[in-house]
Amino acid sequence: MKHLIVIILRAVALATGIATFVLGLMQRIAMGEGIMLLALGQSCLAMASLQAAGSDRKDGD
């Protein structure tokens, strides 16, 4: 189950990054909104990293 959560968090991070890039190219997003989307993606990557590290630690014990 934790592996699925890690995949979902990484997918959300990828999607927010691509969405920010595309909306920026189309000039349909304000700078502040783009930064908030990128921050959301970064937070998802951090949570995925913590989830993966936690499951690695449990497997090693």
Image: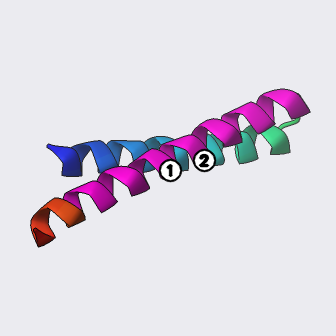
Residue for point 63% across, 47% down: 17
Question: Residue 29, can we see it?
Answer: no
Within the magenta stretch, is there residue 54? yes
Which of labels 2 and 1 is toward the front?
1
Task: Tell which residue pokes out farthest to the front in this image.
Answer: 61
* Residue 40, position as x, y percentages in the image: 61, 36
From which residue to which does the magenta span run?
A: 30-55
User: Relative to 56, is 38 above or below?
Assistant: above
Crowd tier of the residue under label 1, counting other residues whose Cα lies within 10 Å: few below 14, some 14–19, many 20 or above:
some
Residue to which mark 1 is pinned? 46
Helix, strand or loop at disc 2? helix
55 horizontally vs 35: left or right:
left
Residue for point 89% across, 34% down: 31
Magenta highlight: main SS: helix
Residue for point 22% across, 65% down: 56
Residue to which mark 2 is pinned? 42
User: Relative to 61, is 48 above or below?
Assistant: above
52 horizontally vs 32: left or right:
left
Alpha carbons under labels 2 and 1: distance apart: 6 Å
45 horizontally vs 35: left or right:
left
Within the magenta stretch, is there residue 38? yes
